[in-house]
Amino acid sequence: MSNENKEAAAAHEGAEQQTGQQPEAAESKATKAKSESKPKAKAKSETESGASALRAVGVEACKRHQLTQAWVTSDGQVFPQEGDAREHAKNLPSKEILKVTAK
């Protein structure tokens, strides 16, 4: 082992003794504390806004193409037939489709 490696190892051991825990454990606790402080209501509002955005895309497509109804996939693609939307959704992380009727 070279002198540089020995010094680095000694410094690492010294840091562990001072903190009383390994640096990885301290980092994971800090990360865990940060993730717990996030409000959980935000996730719900994001999904609602995402659904309303997809609904708006579908309504606009119905108006533009004179459709009575359309199906929208999670990536914003609009389809006049449900089967086409389902087939496209198979290749997406979210398999959900949204049925939209023209207003």
Image (spheres, rainbow, N blue to C red):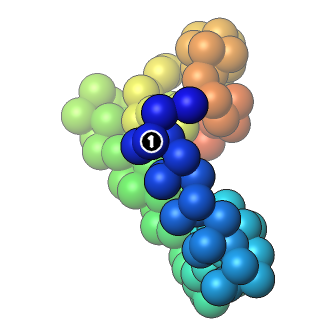
46 shown above or below 78: below
Identify which residue, 32 or 26, lies in the foreground: 26
Q: Nearer the viewer, residue 13 or 57?
A: 13
Q: Position of residue 66 (x, y in %)?
A: 32, 31
Task: Answer above or below: position of 34 versus 51.
Answer: below
Q: Is residue 91 visible?
A: yes
Identify the residue shown where x is 66% and y is 65%.
13
Residue 31: name its quadrant: bottom right
| Whether residue 12 is situated above or below residue 33 in the rendered picture | above
Q: Give neighbour class at mark 1: few <14, some 14-19, many 20+ (Cα, 10 Å).
A: few
Which residue: 48% across, 53% down? 7
Callout 1 secondary element = helix
User: In this orientation, does residue 68 appear?
Assistant: no
Q: Quadrant of residue 95?
A: top right
Front residue of 58/19: it is: 19
Determine the residue positioned at 59% across, 23% down: 92
The amino acid marked with disc number 1 is Asn
**Front residue of 61 and 77:** 77
Residue 100 in the figure: left or right of residue 21: left
* Residue 72 in picture, x, y percent from top left: 51, 35
Q: Quadrant of the C terminus?
A: bottom left
> Label 1 belongs to which residue?
3
Quadrant placement of the N terminus? top right
Judged left or right of residue 85, residue 40 is right
